[in-house]
Image (cartoon, rainbow, N blue to C red):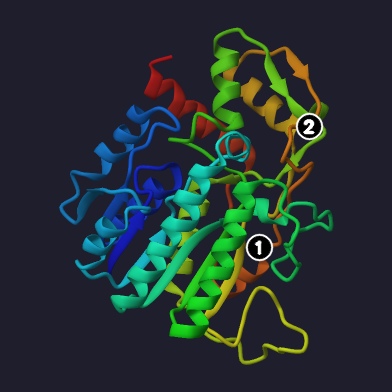
Amino acid sequence: MKVLVTGAAGFIGYHVAQVLLERGDTVVGLDNLNDYYDVTLKEARLARLQPHERFRFEHVDVADRPAMERVFGDGFDRVIHLAAQAGVRYSIENPHSYIDSNVVGFMNILEGCRYNAVEHLTYASTSSVYGANTAMPFSESQGVNHPLAIYAATKKANEMMAHSYAHLFRLPTTGLRFFTVYGPWGRPDMALFKFTKAILNGEPIDVFNYGEHKRDFTFVDDIAQGVVAANDHTAEPDPDWDSDNPDPASSNAPYRIYNIGNNKPVDLMRYIEVLEQELGRSVERNLLPMQPGDVPDTWADASALQRDCGYSPDTPVEEGVRRFVQWYRDYYGV
């Protein structure tokens, strides 16, 4: 297939592009290389993709409508849309960037798919849409009408926008709610990266909610395989969908929402202990209140993605953290 992967220089996008290339697909990778975090890390990911003869890079912002129209004119079988302004905390400080990237940008993706006969759009949502929900594990059939930050609200908007295009234009769309992805080539603004840097520098770490967090930490290789499996499984109308009792995860349009997580929540303190063991150092913990917009726990019911797409994460946190530390030491020469 010929696949457009947006956010290809990003953490998940890079790994997804690798999987597609390794199995023989042609990939056009698109990214704006913004400076939300270290651009050299994005460039280093990109440098590992560019030697592939079936890879081409487009330095484009998804919010740039004329540029996106030009890109879509190249023609794609499938689109995997992973480009977005990420981060819960940053959305409190700079909400406009989330509207530009995550709402305006997503509109351009939908229009590109609509007018260029794309067979299937697979796009990134987030576990953050569960917001104020506390019933565990989180299920796609739960309502998600109480987001706690504008980041989550924009991703909820993406899901609704996708449904309208699935209904009006029969554009098959699949949204994936990611749960705390970690691993090699990860983002510097995420906990594992921050903790590793601090421990190696002999500095204390900030641990929010006094350490009383559980997270469904999911290794990036498992995520990438799941994204590609979802991309291969074109969304179809649900013949059992009941408009009197509507399931938010499906529709009488070609529309699906899936959780993509490890389905094995881990205590944050245990996560830190595993990291300490891998680094061979202990760390002082600054126990702090919960951050605005955050949630205490996450836990994915990923059974629907397993049933429909064969998704089967199998990387324990001990192995995943070990592989991250190995990459970090190698990349930064520590």
Side of 126 relative to 79 (left or right): right
Disc 2 or disc 1, which is closer to the eye? 2
Q: Find numbered disc 1 in the image and state the secondary structure of the residue it sits on.
A: loop
Residue furthest front in the image = 96
User: Can you give x and y, in whole percent of width and height, for residue 209 in the image?
Assistant: 80, 30
* 2 and 1 marks in contact (CB < 8 Å): no
Residue at 50 percent across and 32 percent down: it is 324
Query: Which residue is drawn at the image coordinates 51% and 50% (left, top)?
Result: 99
213 left or right of 187 in image: right
Residue 302 - label: 1
Outermost residue on the top side: it is 202
Q: Quadrant of residue 197?
A: top right
Splitting the image into 4 quarters, where does residue 194 fall?
top right
Give, as a three-letter code, the residue at label 1: Ala
Q: Is residue 236 above or below residue 318?
A: below
Look at label 2 and name its amino acid.
Answer: Met
Task: Please state the total of marks drawn on the protein image.
Answer: 2
Viewer-side residue, 310 vs 196: 196
- Residue nearest the observer in this picture, 334 or 31: 31
Please provide percent x and percent y for residue 300. Answer: 70, 56
The reply to whether residue 126 is visible in this rendering is no
**Residue labelled with disc 2:** 290
Q: CA distance from mark 2 to mark 1?
A: 26 Å
